[in-house]
């Protein structure tokens, strides 16, 4: 493979690497993805699969909106396993009701459909919810998908456009002008993109350490109960849990899967770096879920698993040039939103690489921002 004429070599075949590869190959660039295991087997396989227009941070909102539009424009969109569930943001009390109404105003101002459901309305649309909730904000347009399938389809698009997606080909090092595979093969490329999720820190060629920490998350899936819930539902406290820096947190999050199963999330933990499921934390998640869905404990949980979200200190991804390196790029750090924001990430990265002005402001995602903060 030495001397291969590549415009871009991409490290990592998760949803982010595959979306970037697809965007670049569609722009006519010669692309190869090197994936150390299987396409979509990292955080992408562990995810809940909620495509959700998070709006609490303006930069994240801009990236999520761009991404949702690009997902819908993707040729593969109609073919993937997908449910247009919308999202119910559940309010437990008046303070959360106020937060939900502020969220509604922000979403509506951006042209998104969001309506407030009173406790009575809520009973009509989700009869299994607890009776003592303060209501919910229903956001149309959010979706439930299956991440590994999306990554595989994006990879298939790359191959169909003449690009390469090589599995079981781990990368050992990056350098200007290419990379070196773990088997010693050297690959030449005009540009290299590091999109290795949580493992990006190991290959990071920057001078200061990469500002990225793995944040463990656990999920559980039940037996088939079609119609048990109809919407993706998230407690409003989820945002505080996701953006907070607590070492350990749980927040209620549930989805109806296309299979009829109920997918239950989720936890966040920095200090636990072991791959297995923590039964104590899982029990805490189920207790939290019972606050909202009192009957959920009676469903049979078929499987539990854990994965790691690539988390940056400010919760925003890193998209752009490795500081001080012209031809080395990075796209990682999407924490719990990488399935949603992979397409927007790819668009911003590709525009920067091609010297075009991205559709949204790329400054909030600059990889150099943490180095600047230290300087
Ligand atoms: C429990 C949980 C729930 C989540 N729920 C959601 C959700 O509902 N909605 C949402 O939008 N997001 C969600 N996420 C977040 C989402 O899964 C991630 O943000 C996203 O998958 C990150 O994609 P990635 O491509 O950057 O990383 P990954 O999917 O981890 O891909 C990186 C790839 O790089 C490969 N790699 C690593 N090192 C090397 C190397 N040296 N050489 C070659 N290849 C290498 C890995 O094998 C891996 O396949 C969730 C995450 C978790 C853990």
Image (cartoon, helix red, strand yellow):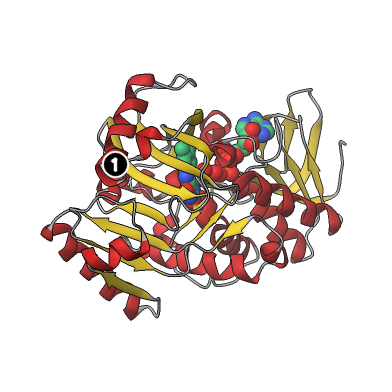
* Position in image of residue 361 (x %, y %): 44, 68
Quarter holding ligand 1: top right
Which residue carries the number 1 mark?
294
For the N terminus, the image quarter is: top right
Task: Decide which of 86, 259 is in the foreground and name it.
Answer: 259
Whether residue 344 is visible here, answered yes or no, is yes
Name which residue lies at 37% across and 39% down.
296
Quadrant assignment, res 70: bottom right
Q: Please tell me whether mark 1 sits on a helix, a strand or a loop.
A: loop
Quadrant assignment, res 352: bottom right
Whether residue 333 is visible here, answered yes or no, is no
Name which residue lies at 64% across and 35% down.
41
* Position in image of residue 105 (x %, y %): 26, 75
Q: Is residue 100 above or below residue 255?
A: below
Q: Is residue 354 above or below residue 321?
A: below
Name which residue lies at 76% across and 31% down.
169
Dot 1: few (<14), some (14–19), or many (≥20) neighbours within 10 Å? some
Task: Decide which of 145, 23 is in the foreground and name it.
Answer: 145
Name which residue lies at 81% across and 28% down.
185
């Amino acid at each position: 493979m030495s001397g291969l004429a590549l415009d871009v070599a991409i490290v990592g075949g998760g949803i982010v690497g595959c979306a970037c590869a697809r965007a670049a190959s569609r722009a006519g660039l010669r692309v190869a993805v090197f994936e150390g295991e299987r396409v979509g087997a990292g955080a992408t396989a562990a995810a809940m699969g909620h495509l959700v227009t998070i709006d609490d941070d303006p930069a994240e909102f801009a990236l999520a909106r761009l991404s949702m539009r690009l997902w819908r424009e993707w040729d593969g969109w109609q073919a993937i396993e997908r449910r247009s569930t919308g999202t119910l943001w559940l309010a437990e009390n008046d303070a959360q009701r106020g937060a939900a109404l502020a969220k509604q105003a922000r979403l509506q101002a951006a042209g998104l459909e969001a309506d407030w459901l009173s406790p009575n309305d809520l009973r009509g649309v989700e009869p299994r919810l607890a009776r003592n909730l303060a209501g919910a904000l229903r956001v149309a347009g959010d979706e439930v998908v299956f991440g590994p399938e999306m990554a595989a389809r994006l990879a298939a698009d790359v191959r169909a456009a003449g690009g390469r997606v090589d599995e079981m080909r781990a990368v050992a090092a990056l350098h200007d002008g290419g990379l070196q595979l773990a088997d010693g093969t050297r690959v030449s490329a005009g540009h290299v993109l590091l999109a290795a999720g949580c493992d990006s820190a190991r290959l990071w060629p920057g001078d200061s350490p990469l500002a990225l920490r793995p944040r463990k998350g656990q999920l559980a899936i039940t037996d088939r109960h079609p119609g048990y819930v109809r919407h993706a539902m998230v407690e409003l406290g989820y945002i505080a849990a996701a953006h907070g820096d607590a070492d350990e947190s749980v927040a209620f999050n549930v989805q109806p899967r296309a299979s009829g199963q109920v997918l239950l999330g989720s936890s966040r933990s920095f200090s636990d770096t072991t791959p297995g499921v923590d039964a104590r934390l899982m029990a805490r998640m189920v207790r939290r879920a019972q606050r909202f869905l009192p009957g959920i404990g009676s469903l049979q949980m078929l499987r539990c698993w854990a994965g790691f979200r690539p988390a940056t200190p400010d919760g925003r991804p890193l998209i752009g040039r490795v500081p001080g390196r012209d031809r080395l790029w990075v796209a990682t750090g999407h924490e719990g939103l990488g399935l949603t924001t992979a397409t927007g990430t790819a668009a911003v990265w590709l525009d920067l690489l091609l010297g075009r002005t991205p559709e949204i402001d790329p400054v909030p995602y600059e990889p150099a921002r943490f180095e600047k903060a230290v300087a």
